[in-house]
Each structure stands twice: as structure tokens, then as C-alpha cells.
């Protein structure tokens, strides 16, 4: 799938169909990253880090707790995929 144009994004935003994970994400003038698969918006690097850690922590609690210690990521440069659909950036 090709990267959407700003016009397409604005149209989807107006229709409330922006993010395939959340159904709607408010658009700002600047997005730090946008997933090419589910189109989730990360307005800031901090949003990406927080979402990534929250989702991985939930998975760790369900499946990996006790196998290894929880080590959160604080460096946005160490995150290579969308927190919600795991698609590579």
C-alpha cells in the first residue's frame, strides 16, 4: 500500500476513520511517525516510546513474566516497528 497523501489523511480524519487500530486519531500539523500498515499516528517520540512500552509490558505480564526481567525501552531509536500492529517503520 502506498503512503497516503495529506488530502487522503484529512479526508479520513474528517470521516473519523484515521487509525485502523483506534478508529480515529486527531491530526496535528506534525506527526513524528505514522505506521504504513495501520496508519496509527505517533505525534511525538515520547508517544511512540510510551505506547511501545505499555503494549510490550502487557504482553510480558501475560506470557513472559518469570522468564526474564522487564526492561523498558527509553530510546526511540531502538524502536523499529509500530506498537500496535508490529509493522516495520
Image (spheres, rainbow, N blue to C red):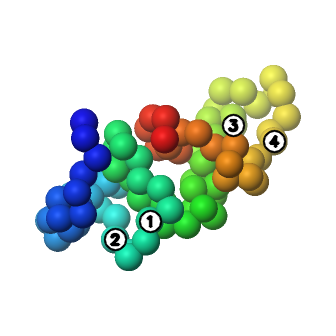
Q: Tag 4, which secondary structure?
A: loop
> In front: mark 3 or mark 2?
2
**Does residue 37 show up?**
yes
Q: Residues within 10 Å of mark 2 (few under 14, many from 20)?
A: some
**Separation (CA) of disc 1 from disc 3:** 30 Å
Q: Is residue 53 left or right of residue 30?
A: right
Mark 3 or 4, which is nearer the eye? 4
Q: Are marks 1 and 4 in contact (CB under 8 Å)?
A: no
Image quadrant in which you'd find residue 65:
top right
Residue at horizontal 60 percent and vertical 48 percent from the top: 52
Where is mark 1, residue-wise?
31
- In this picture, residue 24 sits left or right of residue 69: left
**Label of residue 61 in the image:** 3
Q: Earlier in the sequence, mark 1 or mark 4?
A: 1
Q: Residues within 10 Å of mark 4 (few under 14, many from 20)?
A: few
Residue 29, horizontal then vertical, whole percent: 38, 76
Q: Are marks 2 and 1 in contact (CB under 8 Å)?
A: yes
The answer to whether mark 3 and mark 2 are in CB contact below 8 A is no
Residue 63 screen position, x and y as percent: 66, 27
From the image, tell me which residue sits under label 2: 27
User: Mark 4, mark 2: which one is toward the viewer?
Assistant: 2
Q: From mark 3 to mark 2, how far is it between C-alphas?
A: 32 Å
Image quadrant occupied by the N terminus: top left
Measured in 3D between alpha carbons, the distance from the residue under mark 3 to the one under mark 4, in whole angstroms, is 12 Å
Q: Which residue is mark 4?
A: 71
Q: CA distance from mark 2 to mark 1?
A: 8 Å
Q: Which of pointers 1 and 3 lies earlier in the amino acid sequence?
A: 1
- Give the mark nearest the N terminus, 4 or 2: 2
Crowding around mark 3 (Cα neighbors within 10 Å: few <14, some 14 to 19, many 20+) is few
Quarter of the view holding residue 19:
bottom left
Which element carries disc 2, helix, strand or loop? loop
What is the secondary structure assignment of the residue under circle 3?
A: helix
Amino acid at each position: 500500500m502506498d503512503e497516503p497523501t495529506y488530502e487522503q489523511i484529512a479526508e479520513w480524519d474528517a470521516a473519523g476513520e484515521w487509525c485502523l487500530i483506534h478508529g480515529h486519531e486527531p491530526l496535528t500539523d506534525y506527526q513524528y511517525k505514522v505506521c504504513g500498515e495501520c496508519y496509527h499516528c505517533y505525534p511525538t517520540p515520547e508517544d511512540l516510546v510510551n505506547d511501545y512500552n505499555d503494549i510490550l509490558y502487557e504482553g510480558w505480564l501475560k506470557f513472559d513474566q518469570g522468564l526474564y526481567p522487564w526492561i523498558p525501552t527509553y530510546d526511540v531509536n531502538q524502536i523499529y516497528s509500530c506498537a500496535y500492529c508490529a509493522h516495520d517503520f
